[in-house]
Image: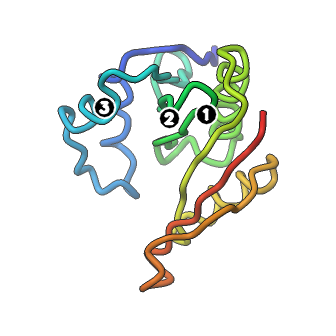
Amino acid sequence: MNVIIIAGIEQAFLLANQIPEFTGDFDYQEMVDKIAGRKCLSLIYVIDDTPVAFKLGYEINPSEFYSWLGGVVPGHRGYGIAKKLLLKQESWAREQGYSAIRVKSMNDFPEMLCMLISNGYLINDVSNKDSPKDLKIHFYKNL
């Protein structure tokens, strides 16, 4: 059975360290500190009682939500799991009264860039312009 659950940051942390693109260098306390005092959402995608993906975000201000981290463990990619988490996060944010979602990605993650654009996210800024590889692409979507 496949389900999306709302879970604690601990589960998101464990999954983040299974995502090779993140190089396994997440510090749990840094993650906790980043969202401390903010309204946040940690979604976990579970297949047959095994967590295989996550999406973590937090409130920027009362009208905007920031989609911070997410990933699908290798072996479970290509089945639309990331999109399902994205849509669930958008639905939750809308229900909470947010009018927009922001997210950043990089050229190193072309699948993420394509998913965001195909789901109505618009590029509204770029940063770290010194290297195309490290370019951060800022997206915005009205809910």
Q: Position of residue 138 (x, y in %)?
A: 59, 59
Callout in the foreground (2, 3): 2
Q: Which residue is mark 2?
A: 60
What amino acid is at disc 2? Ile
How many numbered callouts?
3
Tell me the SS state at disc 3. Answer: helix
**Residue reaching furthest front?**
62
Q: Is residue 94 above or below residue 139?
A: above
What amino acid is at disc 1? Glu
> What whole-number distance in Å separates the C-alpha atoms at marks 1 and 2?
6 Å
Q: Quadrant of residue 16?
A: top left
Q: Quadrant of residue 12?
A: top left
- The reply, left or right, for residue 92 in relation to residue 71 is right
Question: Mark 2 and mark 1 in contact (Cβ < 8 Å)?
Answer: yes
Q: Which residue is mark 3?
A: 14
**Which residue is located at x 33 percent, y 21 percent?**
37
Is 43 or 41 nearer to us in this picture? 41
Question: Mark 3 and mark 2 in contact (Cβ < 8 Å)?
Answer: no
Q: Quadrant of residue 114?
A: bottom right
Tell me the SS state at disc 2. Answer: strand
Q: Which residue is mark 1?
A: 64
